[in-house]
Image: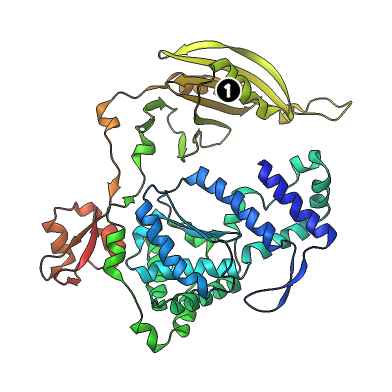
């Protein structure tokens, strides 16, 4: 838990204790409801969550696209029920197709979801839906319920640092982003999305094809297109689509759609995984941007985020976590700092020492780490883990491998873990260093023809046709008009 989150959580709890928060009026419904999180604390929670989100996913490095999304969103802010909130809008650098909102007015859309859209109105309705969740305080209300459920444990956590370390805070960090809203919350957010987008001049009818695209993606999940997190964080039902259709009025058909302007804004958008940030070939991981590579055991899985790389066997009885930090600290001193994360545990040293790994300076330490026993009690061997911490300097970065297994499983994984770490090396292969991500390209149709004919003329691999049909919401045999803009990659 970060220091900011400790302060925020303590503020929330103390507010509940002294009666600052309680039964308040919902700004959307006008009804009274229990709310243990006042707006000022909600905003602070949003700031802290935003830090965690940026570390986990990273912001998409395109100021023009970010400004475009921000401009669309801010057209609707004056029509919301909480127009004075300090709203923040961002594009996240991940292929996951999602949009979500953190407390206090922080709204995110991923580049993966932008790649699915085909008009500014479609983007507006998605942002308006998230603004609906913020304005109805759905996240804050759900967290208030959890605070009440946790009851005495939570109160104790405000009064004791020791209890705070082990209390099951469901409101901490990025978990607030994945609160599952009820169906009624989703219906309300849809209703507000229609209202806010319509008042800003956008056609809310574009919410329908977006939902239909999500449904198609769900149906295609088994065929190679990945199921998006949008469906788990915003459960979609056929009834939701029908309810949105009921909210539409004839004038909606005359409102702004702005298809070409949106498509030009996503010209050059990174599509899919970005191999510059790391990619897997066989049993090797390569990172062109930081110019390193390492091998991992056959059959182990890899999870790569901007913050860390995690490799683990399928039984999840071990894990190797790699992080990188730009620093000029001496390697053994840096290694010592990494051990401070175990300050709340009992640590027994197995071995330590410096060594060279493929010409790079490294320092390794192996330890048994156990929860500190109560006074007069013995260490619980069943809860003891074996932890290897290896720091490797490469140029201006220190790369840290932290390997974890249970004490009992350590002999089974020690060799595999050490081989993984010792395989770390500079990346020099020109082919790997030169790999580039796929980019969406917006192209005008030269003449009236089918989408299939257009793809053939542009020598697009037929392996991409199904995906491009989905991304453009155009059938392969649908007729295109001269000058119509379409996406390819």
In this picture, residue 451 sits left or right of residue 164: left
Q: Depth check: give the residue in front, 415 or 342.
A: 342
Is any atom of residue 485 visible in this view? yes
Q: Position of residue 188 (x, y in %)?
A: 57, 75
Q: Depth check: give the residue in front, 31 or 417.
A: 31
The colour scheme is rainbow
Residue at horizontal 60 percent and vertical 61 percent from the top: 180
In this picture, residue 437 sits left or right of residue 479: right
Q: Depth check: give the residue in front, 11 or 486.
A: 11
Residue at horizontal 54 percent and vertical 73 percent from the top: 80
Residue tagged by mark 1? Answer: 389
Quarter placement of the N terminus: top right
Q: Residue furthest bottom?
A: 250
Q: Position of residue 95 (x, y in %)?
A: 40, 51
Occupied quadrant, residue 124: bottom left
Q: Is 304 located above or below residue 339 in the figure?
A: below
Q: Position of residue 130 (x, y in %)?
A: 52, 66
């Amino acid at each position: 838990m970060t220091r900011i989150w400790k302060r925020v959580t303590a503020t929330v709890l103390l507010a509940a204790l002294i009666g600052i928060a309680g039964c308040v009026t919902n700004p959307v419904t006008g009804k009274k409801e229990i709310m243990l999180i006042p707006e000022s604390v909600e905003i602070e929670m949003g700031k802290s969550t935003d830090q965690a989100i940026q570390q986990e996913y990273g912001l998409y490095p395109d100021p023009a696209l970010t400004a475009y999304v921000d401009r669309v969103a801010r057209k609707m802010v004056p029509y919301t029920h909480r127009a004075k909130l300090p709203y923040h809008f961002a594009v996240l650098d991940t292929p996951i197709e999602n949009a979500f909102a953190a407390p206090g007015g922080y709204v995110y859309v991923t580049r993966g979801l932008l790649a699915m859209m085909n008009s500014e109105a479609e983007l507006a309705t998605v942002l308006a839906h998230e603004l609906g969740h913020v304005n109805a305080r759905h996240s804050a209300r759900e967290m208030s319920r959890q605070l009440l459920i946790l009851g005495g444990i939570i109160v104790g956590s405000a009064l004791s640092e020791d209890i705070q370390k082990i209390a099951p805070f469901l409101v901490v960090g990025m978990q607030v982003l994945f609160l599952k809203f009820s169906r009624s919350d989703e219906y309300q957010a849809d209703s507000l999305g229609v209202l806010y987008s319509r008042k800003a001049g956008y056609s809310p009818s574009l919410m329908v094809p977006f939902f239909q695209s999500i449904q198609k993606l769900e149906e295609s999940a088994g065929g190679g297109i990945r199921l998006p997190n949008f469906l788990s964080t915003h459960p979609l039902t056929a009834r939701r689509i029908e309810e949105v259709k009921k909210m539409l009025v004839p004038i909606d058909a005359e409102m702004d759609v702005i298809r070409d302007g949106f498509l030009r804004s996503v010209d050059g958008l990174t599509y899919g995984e970005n191999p510059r940030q790391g990619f897997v070939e066989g049993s090797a991981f390569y990172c062109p941007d930081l110019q390193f590579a390492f091998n991992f055991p056959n059959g182990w899985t890899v999870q790569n985020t901007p913050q860390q790389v995690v490799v683990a066997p399928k039984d999840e009885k071990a894990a190797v976590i790699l992080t990188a930090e730009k620093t000029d600290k001496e390697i053994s001193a840096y290694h010592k700092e990494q051990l401070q994360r175990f300050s709340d545990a009992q640590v027994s040293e197995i071995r330590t020492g410096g060594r060279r790994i493929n010409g790079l300076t490294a320092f390794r330490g192996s330890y048994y780490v156990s929860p500190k026993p109560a006074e007069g009690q013995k260490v619980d061997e069943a809860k003891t883990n074996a932890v290897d911490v290896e720091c490797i300097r490469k140029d201006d970065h220190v790369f840290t491998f932290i390997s974890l297994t249970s004490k009992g499983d350590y002999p089974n994984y020690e060799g595999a873990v050490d081989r993984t770490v010792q395989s770390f090396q500079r990346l020099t292969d020109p082919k790997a260093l030169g790999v580039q991500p796929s980019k969406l390209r917006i192209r005008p149709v030269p003449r009236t023809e089918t989408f299939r004919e257009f793809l053939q003329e542009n020598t697009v691999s037929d392996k991409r046709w199904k995906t491009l049909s989905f991304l453009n919401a155009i059938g392969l045999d649908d007729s295109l008009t001269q000058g119509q803009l379409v996406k390819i990659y």
